Amino acid sequence: MNTQTQNAFRALADPTRRDIVQMLASEDMTIAQLTGHFDMTRAAVKKHLTVLSDGGLITFEARGRERINRLEPKGMAPVLDWLRYFDRFWDDRLANLKNAIEGTNR
Amino acid sequence: MNTQTQNAFRALADPTRRDIVQMLASEDMTIAQLTGHFDMTRAAVKKHLTVLSDGGLITFEARGRERINRLEPKGMAPVLDWLRYFDRFWDDRLANLKNAIEGTNR
DNA sequence: TTGACATGATACCTTTCGGTACCGTAAAAA
DNA sequence: TTTTTACGGTACCGAAAGGTATCATGTCAA
């Protein structure tokens, strides 16, 4: 079976982790910075980051005593691939998506 | 917060449930039919179907003593909408998806 | 050098999850 | 009618998930 697909879907299953992904879409952030946006301990946030890393959705780089967390777009590929399997079922939605893509590419 | 989005992502987090979704993409099936494809009890499969139903990914219809389970494409909308938020990050992947869509639409 | 700061790592707790076993009910078939 | 058959529902179990608390470590700054 495909471990990457499973890890990616699992990573996206938690609302906190989806929020983290959205935050990292705006800018790279340290663990402490991310923790500032949630009502939980740094240890909890770091666990979520580990799950996101296992899912291939983020990477990180140690810089001094800080750890810069960064979004990894490639990690979303297994998810998009799996969804693509159902093209014929949600054509209308995919049409919207297609329009959005064409809009941003111009 | 958005419960539909959470329930949909949660429903997709389990490999058995993703398999069920793929099977229902081929044809509508009863609980017993689905169970035949897995190495687990009917009760376990039914639990998965309940989670999928909560996520809005399937619907079902009682027909006599059988229950016909059917894929519900609309349920995927929250997932696709969430993913669309990140357009600018996975442009290359979206480009592939766009090509696939155009291919199937022609 | 000393102290504050950002993180890593581990143990522990509680809840949820995936699964089985078992019982009951309604419909189809003999 | 009697007997299968396809369900629904609940109780229960072990494992994993989400979270806290705590301690250790490396780094930056005074």
Image: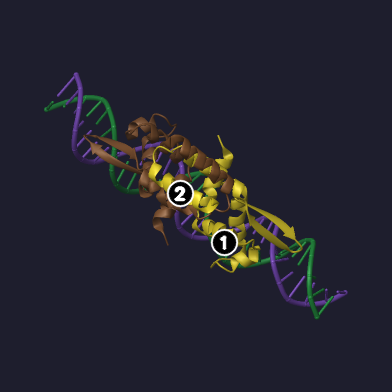
Chain colours: A yellow, B brown, C purple, D green
Q: Is residue B79 above or below residue A87?
A: below
Foreground disc of the pair 1, 2 = 2
Residue type, label 1: Met
Residue that mark 2 sits on: A99
> Where residue D8 sits: x, y (%)?
28, 43
Q: What number of labels is visible?
A: 2
- Left/right of residue A73 with respect to residue B82 in the rendered view: right
Q: Please name whichever residue, B24 or A77, is drawn nearer the observer in this view of the structure.
A: A77
Quadrant of res C28? top left
Q: CA distance from mark 1 to mark 2?
A: 25 Å
Which chain contains the residue that carries disc 1? A
Q: Position of residue B43 (x, y in %)?
A: 36, 39
- Residue A48, relative to residue D2: is it above or below? below
| Residue shown at 50% from the left, 42% from the top | B98
**Counting other residues with Cα less than 10 Å from the Cα at mark 2, is it few (<14), some (14-19), or many (20 or more)?**
few
Q: Residue A18: x, y in percent?
A: 52, 56
When asked about the image quadrant of residue D3, the answer is: top left
Secondary structure of the residue carrying tag 1 is helix
Determine the image quadrant of residue D28. Answer: bottom right
| Residue B40 drawn at (x, y percent) | 43, 34
Q: Are marks 1 and 2 in contact (CB under 8 Å)?
A: no
Residue type, numbered disc 2: Asn
In which chain is the residue bearing label 2? A
Q: Which residue is at a point 56% across and 44% down the rendered structure image?
A: B93
Question: Tag on residue A68?
Answer: none
- Identify the residue position indicated by label 1 in the image: A23
Visible residue check, residue B36: yes
